[in-house]
Image (cartoon, rainbow, N blue to C red):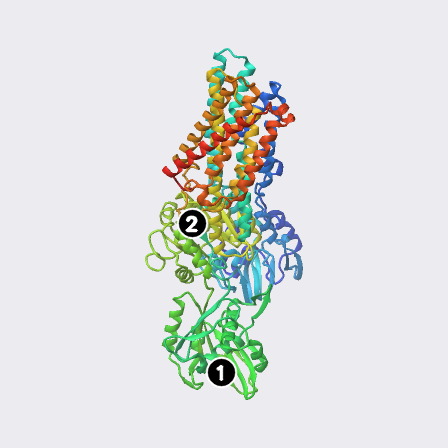
Amino acid sequence: METLLNKKWHNISKEETISLLGVDPQKGLDVFETEKRIKHFGENIISSKRQKTSFERLLLQFHQPLVYILLAAGSVTAFLGEWVDSFVILGVVIVNALVGSFQESKAVKALKSLSATMNVEAVAIRAGETVRLEASQLVPGDMVILRSGDKVPADLRIFSSKELRNDESTLTGESVSVEKNAQVVAGEAVLAERHCMAYAGTLVSSGQGRGVVVATGNMTEIGRISGLIDSADELETPLTRKITRFSHMLLLAILGLAGTSIVIGLARSEPLSDVFMAAVALAVGAIPEGLPAAVTIILALGVSRMAQRKAIIRKLPAVETLGGTTVICSDKTGTLTENQMTVQTIFSGNSYYEVSGTGYGDEGDIVALDKGITPRENLSLEECVRAGALCNDARISNKNGRPSVVGDPTEGALLVSAAKFGLNYKDEFKSLPRVDELPFESEWQYMVTLHEQDDGVVAYMKGAVEKVLNCCFQEVLPNGENGALDKQSVIEAQQKMAAKGQRVLALARKRLPADSALERQDACMGMDFLGLQGMIDPPREEAKVAIAACQNAGVEVKMITGDHALTAQAIGLMLGLRGSDCTIGQDCPVMTGSEIGELSDTDLIEKVGQIPVFARVSPEQKLRLVMALQARGEICAMTGDGVNDAPALKQSDIGIAMGISGTDAAKEAADMVLTDDNFATIEAAVEEGRGVFANLVKFIAWTLPTNAGEGLVILLAVLFGASLPILPVQILWINMTTAACLGMMLAFEPKEPGIMDRSPRRPDRPILDHVLLRRVGFVSILLLVCAFGLFEWELYNGASLEKSRTMAVNAFVVIEAFYLFNSRSFTRSPFDLGLTSNPWILGGFGVMMILQAIFTYAPVMHNLFASAPIDFLDWVKILLCGIVVYLLIEVDKKLVGKDV
């Protein structure tokens, strides 16, 4: 049985398949053989690898360099008997861990969703009887019966079919249902062209058939995709990578400073407890304790804003990742296009007509091109659209107030084109009731319906152009009479429409006596040609605008689809896609999956940046394209809706799934879900992401001077052998209250104008560049001078140690409050932005001052934080420090300003 693995079943005849599987196609497998095979192959389910538990994810929140320092500081203070300090430090760590664990993304559930696709019933033939059983009990060799509406339970080699068509869009990306038959296809045929195979998880859209199971569980195509999801890397986002790098740098600096303070203290022969308290104070002061919570809250607010713009974020860091996206790889159907087949061109009576409007609504019109005969004057055109409506099994219904098609999308498009001409298909069916039909079969490639009318019957035909033309000797002229058929002009019209990526159907009719019946052998004789209708799934208008905005913002957009190359190229042209140095349709060719397969990884990495459209792409190739872009240093966003998209969604820096048409597997593998399946929403989310990152940088640039200033104050005190101007517990009070009341208000800062006119941030660019680092250093020195100066001044003038420290603490808080207004923009003054454009800033300022009053004057705070009351003149000194710092930063901003 091991020889059955990895066979190209689409390239093996029915007879050889039976022989290899050892099955009687009429009787199927017997009970003993099925039991033997299920033991050998296992159940027909998809297994998944173990995911982290909630407890494991909580423990990982403590696996951060800065948290290690806080834990060590908390332990040292507890050892020294400073229980208040210890409990406050450890409390901060635990709160941050709980917040991070709560907001962290849920474990990937894509594999469970894939398994759910197999959780269906199947009809099989066993021991000569037809039985219904759970799909999980199927084994290779089982004979399975397929009917319209069934979900295919395993990978099948088709044995027989009757008008069998499968919707394989979730697996291949093909937007139109695929005809299935038993004919062998070439071994190198891509998944979408293996017409003799039915794959697990796809849907039987029409007809019926019979096939033999050739693969189950993880050996199916959908199981193979689950393996790709497992193998896709769990990538860190650019933000988490930068925060990690920043944390390591900060860790080294803190350990260096703390070690220096210990060495200096020991060299001065100071008491060991004082030495360690100074080191703890320095470490606690240098650590931005509020940063983890701030990052989480700023990202969470971004999530809320994006939800209002129809983008649901499943994983918090994805908010920031969007802002740094450099390439968006988008699926075609439903994201860039309407996912509604629409007739756009009609050729009838030797004239071309343009059909306006998109989708399955009847808004639109039919207009003559090139000064042709007007639609109402062309009787052949009227018959052409009537034929499309009557030789048709689809219906239009309203689903949630939106027109949708029940049946084949191409047939739905024909109903709509008739409606735009002015024909109601329901009225047409009443006046010309169907009395007979020859359904579409792959062997004939056409469909014929027979309709009763007053003076006899009329047969309408639709199908492939070459097949219908072979049945016609004459054509219906615009005046309604028959004339000689110019087949060459029809072929030229077909080629012209196909060049636009349109799927072209030909229509014809034949009038017959009243007692006539349809017979396959003579139905194709003596037809009168009516015309051609060319249809396409048209691009969304808002997607064109969004793509232009993205490209203007330096974000490349690439289309990756399972559809035909010609269709993909036509859509790419309409959308205005372009490569890094060329335009689609001119310098840039469309690259197909087979061409990708011929390229080495090195060649693909080199060429992937130049090509804007990829067609007939398999799941492995989508994954490979994403990895190639990432190898070029790109931050890659990937959109998709099918099971076939899930591996690439997981591998990309940010996976984006469709909320309406997307499969559960795609949604669970993604970081973001679009509730409207619209590419324009991605562009809006990128804008929001840039705003979120800008606010995050503003917070970091605002909070770091406090930590650096606190560390410098402690270090200076150690160097001079002076008393500590601020205690560890006071440092924690400053850091946590200011972060919550002041810094968090920057999360509500509106996006600055022109944010989408900037180029995307490069992945290797640090969070703070040299300009912002210089400003952080400048503000840190100002804080050092003001806080240490006030502390020493008060001591010099006879104030108590508690009052002097209270002055230093309030100096830090007030200067931070004034600097907060500076930090609203790195280039504009708060007056240019409008003082009330972010009312949260003013509210936070007020709350912070109330808390400082409590810190300064409440007796309970005196006991907990060793604070003391200060008088009015002391507040004047502190406020003057804040105003001076504010003015100096505004001057610096005018001299050296830089956007993020």
Q: Which residue is mark 2?
A: 756
Q: Position of residue 613 (x, y in %)?
A: 40, 56
**In the depicted structure, whether residue 48 falls above or below residue 167:** above
Give the amino acid at mark 2.
Answer: Met
Circle 1 SS class: strand
Q: Nearer the viewer, residue 853 or 213?
A: 853
Amino acid of disc 1:
Lys
- Could you tell me which residue is drawn at 36 percent across and 49 percent down? 607
Q: Is residue 431 left or right of residue 576?
A: right
Labels 1 & 2 near each other (Cβ < 8 A): no
Residue position marked by numbered label 1 in the rendering = 510
**Residue sitting at x 61%, y 36%:** 98
Residue 689 seen in the current view: yes
Residue 699 location in percent, x, y?
A: 49, 37
Residue 247 shows in this picture: no
- Residue 76 sits in quarter: top right
Count residues near mark 1 (Cα–Cα under 10 Å), then give few for <14, some for 14-19, many for 20+. some
Q: Mark 1 or 2, which is nearer the eye?
A: 2
Image quadrant in which you'd find residue 74: top right
- Name the spot of residue 346 as percent of width and height, x first: 43, 74
Pointer 2: residues within 10 angstroms few (<14), some, or many (20+)?
many
Helix, strand or loop status at disc 2: helix
Question: The C terminus lies in which quarter of the figure?
Answer: top left
The answer to whether 632 is drawn above or below residue 773 in the figure is below
Considering depth in this image, is 300 or 216 the residue closer to the camera? 300
Q: Which mark is residue 854?
A: none
Which quarter of the picture shows residue 763? top left
Q: Position of residue 244 (x, y in %)?
A: 48, 34
Q: Residue at x 59, y 32 (%)?
A: 851
Q: Gap in Å between the C-alphas at discs 1 and 2?
A: 59 Å
Residue extending furthest front?
873
Give the mark, 1 or 2, whose residue is nearer the N terminus. Answer: 1
